[in-house]
Amino acid sequence: MQSHELLREVFQETSPKQIAAELGLSLSMIYKWAEPPEENGSGSTNPLDRINALIRLTGDTRLAQWVSERAGGFFIKNPKAHWLHPHLVIPATNQIVQEFADLLAVIATAAFDNSISKEEAKTIRARWEDLKSVTEGFVRHCEEGNFVAVKDELSRKKPA
């Protein structure tokens, strides 16, 4: 889906007039964002395309992470696809279960004294983010039938 198409759908559910007022922009500018780039000719790139350009130009996915957090979510980068032999699914499955067990161990250790310090919370968050990323990689590789890449991905995520 193109950014202008998404914005057109969003504007069917949210008032462009209200958006224009809240952002301090003209209503015509808001409507131009929902037009294909070749039609508006004004050079007004919509905010979604600008975010896309920032990520492309900087190569820094923290921008996507920041936007995802503001929307109440989490950004997970999709792994690169490689089609390899699928014989390693069982060890990869066991390893992802172990990753989850390791996270639970970190939580249990932190909560042992019935309080969790800021540093312990930071460690839990880091392990959780790693687990989410590894799990997404696992699922993607499974969808592609690429279980060797799953094993490689999980091995890279193991703490030293």
Image: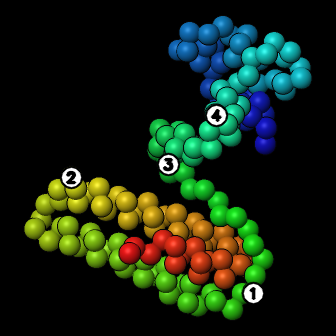
Mark 3 near mark 4, Cβ–Cβ under 8 Å? Answer: no
First reached walking from the N terminus: tag 3 or tag 4: 4
SS type, badge 2:
helix
The residue at which mark 1 appears reads as: 85
> Based on the displayed image, in which of its 4 quarters is residue 25 positioned?
top right
Q: Tag 1, which secondary structure?
A: loop
Q: What amino acid is at disc 1?
A: His
Residue closest to the eye, 22 or 90: 90
The residue tagged 3 is: 73
**102 sits to left or right of 1:** left
Vertically, is 159 above or below 85? Answer: above
Residue at the spot 52% in from the left edge and 69% down from the top edge: 134
How many angstroms separate mark 3 from mark 1 (CA)? Answer: 33 Å
Query: Could you say which disc has been placed on residue 56 in the image?
Result: none
The tag earlier along the polypeptide, 4 or 1, is 4
Relative to the observer, which residue lies in front, 52 or 33? 52
Q: Quick one: label 1, few (<14), some, or many (20+) residues within 10 Å?
A: few
Is tag 4's residue or tag 2's residue first in the polypeptide sequence? 4
